[in-house]
Image (cartoon, rainbow, N blue to C red):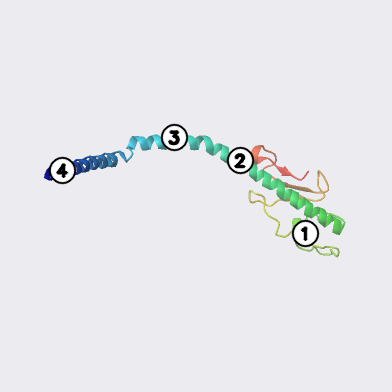
């Protein structure tokens, strides 16, 4: 019986030694080397260099789409104003006539917008001219660069 107990206890000691060395080996293999971390950083940098330009190009396109949607909304409000008043607001009255009753405007039924006239997506006011060169009125944004013409995000967004 003593032999059985001693052989069982020696097996338990041997098992503990193996488990202890396995734990030691796992702890040593658990970390990353500096080289592995540098390789991962380089891969992330390359992916960012490829993805970021495409992402920012989409942001520019979305600003142009927002400007088109806002111009469309303002155009509908201007059309409603014309139905009530018989004419579009003058250049001097500007788009503010959609929110504030102009002097001598007895048939004004506004406000024609729920909120104040927003700036364009590049934080500049929309340009409004009535009578316009292209139609009854010209409503437009000069794009990101604020200059006439341009391509991409710098393109003008117009109502005509």
Q: Nearer the viewer, residue 80 or 5?
A: 5
* Label 3 – label 4 distance at C-alpha: 59 Å
Comparing marks 2 and 4, which lies closer to the viewer?
A: 4
Residue at the right extreme, as displayed: 86
Give the mark nearer the N terminus: 3 vs 1: 3
- Kind of element beneath mark 1: loop
* Label 3 – label 1 distance at C-alpha: 53 Å
Numbered tag placed on residue 4 in the rendering: 4
Residue that numbered label 1 is attached to? 112
Give the mark nearer the N terminus: 3 vs 4: 4
- Kind of element beneath mark 4: helix
How many marks do you count on the picture? 4
159 lies above or below 104: above
Q: Nearer the viewer, residue 121 or 23?
A: 23
CB-based contact (under 8 Å), mark 2 and mark 3? no
Q: Position of residue 10 (x, y in %)?
A: 16, 42
Comparing marks 4 and 1, which lies closer to the viewer?
A: 4
Task: Work out which quarter of the rendered image holds the N terminus and state it.
Answer: top left
Give the mark nearer the N terminus: 4 vs 1: 4
Q: Residue at x 37, y 36 (%)?
A: 38
- Kind of element beneath mark 2: helix
Residue that numbered label 3 is attached to? 43
Residue that numbered label 2 is attached to? 58
Give the mark nearer the N terminus: 2 vs 3: 3
């Amino acid at each position: 019986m003593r032999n059985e107990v001693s052989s069982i206890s020696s097996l338990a000691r041997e098992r503990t030694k193996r488990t202890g060395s396995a734990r030691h080996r796992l702890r040593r293999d658990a970390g990353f080397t500096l080289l592995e971390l540098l390789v991962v950083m380089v891969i992330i940098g390359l992916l960012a260099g490829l993805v970021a330009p495409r992402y920012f190009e989409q942001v520019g396109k979305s600003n142009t789409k927002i400007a088109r949607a806002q111009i469309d909304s303002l155009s509908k409000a201007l059309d409603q104003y014309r139905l009530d008043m018989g004419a579009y607001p003058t250049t001097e009255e500007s788009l503010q006539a959609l929110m504030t009753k102009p002097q001598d405007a007895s048939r004004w039924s506004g406000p024609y917008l729920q909120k104040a006239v927003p700036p364009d997506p590049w934080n500049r006011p929309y340009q409004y001219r009535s009578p316009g060169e292209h139609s009854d009125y010209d409503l437009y944004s000069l794009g990101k660069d604020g200059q006439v013409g341009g391509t991409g995000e710098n393109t003008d967004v117009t109502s005509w």
